Image (spheres, rainbow, N blue to C red):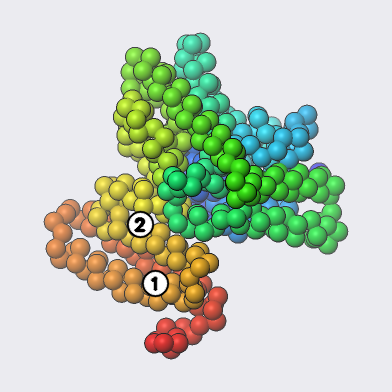
Amino acid sequence: MPSVKSAVSAAIDAIGGVSRIGEDPDSLILFNAAFSVCSEKCRTVIRETGFSHTNVNVDLTTMINYDPRYVALRLMAWDHAMPLAGEIAGWTGSSSMAKTGFDPCVVPLLVDMKANGGEGMVIVDSAVICNYLVRLAGGALMPTEPRQLALVQKHIALVDDAPHPALLYDALPAKDLRPAYLKHLTAGGGLHLQQIRKLKNYLSQEGKTWDDPLLKRAYEAKLKKTEDALRATQSMEGGDSSYIEGSFQKMREYLQTLEADLKASSGEWLCGDKITLADVFEGCSLYRLMFLGCAFLYEDLPIVVRYSGRLFSRPSLLRAVILNRDTMPSKHVAPFYAEHEGWLSGVLHCRKEDLINVMTNPATPYAAAGAALLAVTYRRDLKQDSLLAHGEKESSAPQLRREAQSGQEQIVFHEQVAIAARRKLRCPDDVSDLPGR
């Protein structure tokens, strides 16, 4: 078996996306994805505890998390007494490892390079990772009083088992307020089908690029889990909505439990006046619901609504999750960008979603060409907006700098989309040469 160090090195070679944060970034290495609830929990806890670390951004859109080098690293943390996800339990709409088994192809993953006498240790499962980080930080975010400790673990488990994946992939037709690009990508089980093709492709490489019976078992289990998820989605098209109705009901019941426990608290957090790990988990959960347009699930729970406002203004959650530049856009959360980074940032966040909506819409002829044209138009608008912002908006210099930086980042994004779109349609670099121009 390879060493932890060599396995980490191989996984990083496969994934890339490395950034080093803090004075001692080599001790802790976090493999995570920007648009992953479980990853969001870990990033927020790291910000709360202030740990230096190496951040490895795993791009889920390319499914690089299925690469055998990453899967092999993850399998180093597998307790073989636990079944692999897919071998026993089918698709439940939840990502809870405790309930569904060990998934060898997901994020997050933490490596403590100083553990085991410097040999290193691989840790998986967001609940386990966050509890580990809290202990490493000397108990921060964790109460010592037994009843409060039990309450914290209760809510960690509730969030862990909440069907966030179900609400990402599927929705009640009458209340589907997800960003349009998510509807496009998941329609008819499209995203599941892409994942299945990717897994089958990796399985076909056995004996060529990899040769390990454990990897084969891992891929086969993941394939079964994903095929179960596809069947659940497709059953809805056949008129059976029990799966998604059950998921929404489960989420609603969990939120009602949160309301009751907050009401019983003596302070503004679950355990009184001190924020705990449970609150961090709840913040990530509530924000995901808002992102998906599912805030209606708790809008009639006044204590939860006020609680979410406090959580969403928490600096750790803001920077690790809400204002994370690598995550996906949603107009439901654009007001956060406008509030914290200026009006221009809020507008650009909405435009970013519009652009991705066009790119992913299979019903739009020449969607990529349209996106390329929009990107160029937006690039010009953005430059003009930046000038207008400096000339017309009364604001502090730091605020203007933040808005200018935001504008430049969005310009780069639109340029990248334009390049990708032209490649997709084999268009010329000069969009004036496109048909009809």
Please give the residue where the numbered disc 1 appears in the rendered image. Answer: 375
> What is the x, y in percent for residue 293?
41, 45
Label 2 sits on a secondary structure element that is helix
Quarter of the image with the N terminus in it: top right
Tell me the quarter of the picture where residue 305 sits.
Answer: top left
> Sequence order check: which comes first, mark 2 or mark 1?
2
Q: Is 96 displayed left or right of 215 in the figure?
A: left
Disc 2 crowd, CA 10 A, few/some/many (<14, 14-19, 20+): many
Q: Is 296 displayed left or right of 11 in the figure?
A: left
Label 1 sits on a secondary structure element that is helix
Q: In the rendered image of this protein, does residue 155 appear above or below residue 217?
A: above
Return the mark for residue 424. none
Please give the residue where the numbered disc 2 appears in the rendered image. Answer: 349
Tell me the quarter of the picture where residue 135 sits.
Answer: top right
How far is the residue under mark 2 from the one under mark 1?
A: 14 Å
Q: Amino acid at mark 2?
A: His
Q: In the rendered image of this protein, does residue 83 appear above or below residue 266?
A: below
- The residue closer to the viewer here, 296 or 271, is 296
The residue positioned farthest toward the front in the image shown? 239
The residue sitting at 81% across, 49% down in the picture is: 216
- The residue closer to the viewer here, 337 or 263, is 263
Quarter of the image with the C terminus in it: bottom left
> What is the x, y in percent for residue 340?
28, 47
The residue sitting at 45% across, 46% down in the picture is: 174
